[in-house]
Amino acid sequence: KSGDVVMANEWAAAEAVGDTNVSSIPPSDLITLTHLHEPSVVHSLKRRYENDFIYTNTGPILIALNPFKALPGLYDDDKMTEYWRVGEGVDDNLSLPPHVYANADSAFRQMIRGLELRLSTPIMEGASAEEKNCDQSMLVSGESGAGKTVTTKHIMKYLATLSQRKADHAKRRRAPSPGRREEAPRRNVSTRRISRAASWKAGAQIEEQILESNPILESFGNARTLRNDNSSRFGKFIELQFKETGTLIGAAIDTYLLEKVRLVHQSPGERNFHIFYEMLAAVTEDERKEYFLGNYKAEDFKMLNMSGTYVRRDGANDAVIYDKLVTSMSTMGFDPKTQEDIFKVTMSFLHALNCTFEAVTDDSSKVDESNPHLLATLKLLGLEKSDFEDALCQFEIEAGNTSYTRQVNKENAEKGLEALVKATYGSMFNFIVQSINKKIDYKPKRGEHKGAGKAAYIGVLDIFGFESFKTNSFEQLCINYCNEALQQQFNLYIFKSEQEEYKKEGIDWDFIEFPDNTDVIQLIDKKNVGIISVLTDQCRGPRGTDKTFMDAMYKTCSQHSRFEATPLQQGKGQFVVHHYAGPVMYIVEGFVEKNKDEIPRGGANLLENSTNEFVQLLGKISAEKAAPSGGRSKKRPTAGGQFAAQLNELRKRIDLTSPHYIRCLKPNQSLSPNEFSDAMIADQLKYAGVLEAIRVSRVGYSQRYSHNTFVNRYRFIALSAVNKATAADRTSILANAAAKKVFEQENPNAAPPDDIMGSVGIQKGTTKIFLRQPAFEALERLRSIELNGAAVIIQSIARRFIARCRFFRLRTRIVRAQASSRRFLARKYTRILRSRKSSVKIQTQYRLHRARKAFLQKKWIAIWLQKMARAKSGRKRFTTLYKKRQQEIETSNRNYQAALTLQCMFRQKKAKKAVEGIKRGKIKEDSFYGEHSEAVKILKAEKEKAAIQADKAAAVAKQTAKERIKEVDALKRELQDANAAAGTAKTSKATLATLTAEMNALRAELEAARQDAEASRAKLAEIQVENAELKETMGSGGFYARGGKVQSTQYEDHPDLKQLDERIQGMGLRARQGKSELAALVQSLAILR
């Protein structure tokens, strides 16, 4: 630009870049350029960019050019493994080009080295405060569109994967297995897809949860701007927390200055936050009904249509990103109800800003009830229409103990609604960040040992870059103020603190002038006279406006060298601040309102009175944020004051860490690949102070150790010389020995110079040893060689010890095995002897058993045959007796029947004659008495004969029954014996057939006996009938003369007849008993059959 002539650089064709077609590429570290000036740096970056080498080192700073295209293989797992192996020292000879993975690995290794020093008490006693500090920070900066967010993602991804490798390696060390091959390192944590209705995955690992927080924050905090399609509209500092072993155990996220004004205003070519477009693109029909979206599109909402831009230029699909968002929220522990509440409130903002107001008078207004978006807003937020209208269309003023209600005009009501939406969205964003922190932040467990907790952290800062638009407002002032503060911190770390320490330690050093922006920072934040301080005073005043702020600022800051405001600019409400990156013109309009960041006076109460619990929570968050700060003055916090306090806290945190800088550069404004703007890159290099940093790094010492720490860390390089030296000389002796070895390694055939330490980049200061990066890497390499050699010796001794222990264990096991074998054989021989002796006894008992069994079988057969013979004889005898008895019964029955018949005939005849004589009256009394007495005598005689015969028949029947009972009992016993014999001798078919035949014959005989008994009963029944007729005849009346007296012929007057009747009944009873006995006998025969 100035027209100066500069020297061109020449470099070898020679970087091992893996592409033989590339003939000449600038070096990967620009501090090695022969001629260092701005054109050479820009030209080198351009050549590397043209060959798809987007990363370049400039001393301690990594420059990352945004390629605006995908570079295959640049971020895959194999590339990650290469840098991990080099960092672990596995592939020392492998030279890798600059990469964000290399910087992340460097920060991780430096943290591990610090932890190792912390665990070594003797080393830490002499270590400096810088060495004792293990915490690291990676500061990613650059303007919008330079690729800061993507770079931050890659850093987090690499650190999470490195942590997982450490954890897997620790597990393998804790659980060794002989002969087991070492498993390949675990691949990077993959994002698992789940359904939109998925529930919280409690088993998700901390690395996955940390990575899954990015999509959530991007959806709610990123937006399309003129310079970038995925620009972070907030700053964040991610603290990755590690254990002493290097395992990631948690994280915490701090956010800064969310650009809430984007909710109500976007410039042409920009979009609102991504979440609104993602939901409109991905919601289902049911969700459209639930959110009252109907057929609305993005063009129908005031919140989205003011810029006329609805899509992204990078080709990202909003619907796909929304699905990823839901997946990430489930992974982070947002339950389905919380997700639903967040999405409802998000959609309510679209409807809310579409609500309108009607002017009642010039100073009062009301909500337009005919607007269809009003009902949707109230339903989604759980509000009442009256409460909504009161909160936005009126406010209360307290005067003493009295409160007054004042109306609000239409314009102020609309502003109040916008303020309510901004405050509620900010509260929701804070709630999301807090929820993520609750999930991923490490919480110490009770009883946990000290080494298991948080030991160190690596902070990753992704914050907005320097901004200068056509119209710059309060947000740009805060963003540029933040960049000024970070640039000052960078200057102090790279330039000022470095050079002051070199001077203090007495190091040979050519001091370099560097830009100092302290006066710009004081212009912005100095107490009472800074722009933010003046703005805060105006916001807290009773009548502070943009006009009063502008007048106060012009009056206070007009004499400052970095402040400029011409009369024309003052008339337009403009002023210019000369930042380190160049002048920026700001417009005062809206400064006071944005700095107040107020929610309407009744807005917090409105949200807290909602029927939705989540909206109530947002109201409480808004009320806490708007609450006055403590103290006597009870001053209400402002946005600028809060941001300044957050920025000071951030700077303190960075100052307590070892920073690693990554400068992201944007090669062109059109976001096009393969397009490189030299002027634009030169401006960004100047803004970032890269050229000065390169100059410092070329002659600077990036690594430094206290004398004690240096000796303890590198004593292995010259151990014998260090052990022989005194404590005061150990540092010098070790430094010279180390320098000599480094020189011999780099120049094996050259003679060592006089100042060998200076030639290799080692200097000894008053309290520290300073190392340039090449010397540090060479010493680390030598240290690794010595440690590896010592490790080999230790491993050989350990293997010998393990082998010896294994040998003794094996020998002991062999002796035990032999003893067990001998015992087994002895027991086996003993069992054989015992079995031989026992077999003789068994044979004897077996023979005895067989002989006894044969004897018992023969004995049983004999007894069975005897039983069969007795049974046959008994059946014969029974048959003979049964037949004889049947004959006797038959004879007795005939005689009895005949006697009864004669008696009946005789009595009938006599009775008839008597009746006839009485009727005629002609028979004489004497002859009557004589004849009747004679008849009576005859009847008595016949009666006596019949009684005698009946007695005989009864006695015979009784005797026969007794004999029959005895015979039946004997037959039962024989049948039982036969049945038992038949049960035990089922195999004898012939005998069973004979027994069956005999049983059938006996059954036939019993059947005949039963028939005879039936006949006897029939005859007995006839006698009973005749007896009944006789009783009836006698019972009908009649008299006869005897001894001069008339005798009655009634049945009751003849006891002998009664006795005869009773005997006949007894015979019937005995006959029935015989019948039952016969039935029992038949049943027994049936059982036998």
Image: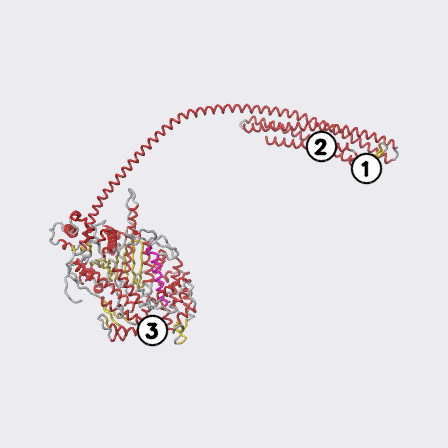
The residue where tag 2 is placed is 1066
Chief secondary structure of the magenta span?
helix
Residue bounds of the magenta highlight: 420-443
**Residue 1056 — which label?**
none
Alpha carbon distance from label 1 to label 3: 150 Å
Q: Residues within 10 Å of mark 3 (few under 14, many from 20)?
A: few
Per the rendering, the mark at residue 542 is 3
In the image, is residue 424 part of the stretch drawn in magenta?
yes
Residue occupying image coordinates x 41% and y 75%:
360
Q: Is residue 895 above or below residue 625?
A: above
Q: Is residue 1038 left or right of residue 134?
A: right
Q: Is residue 733 above or below residue 217?
A: above
Left or right: where 624 falls relative to 867: left
The amino acid beneath tag 1 is Gly
In which quarter of the view is residue 771 placed?
A: bottom left
Residue 629 vertical placement versus 788 (above, below): below
Secondary structure of residue under mark 3:
loop
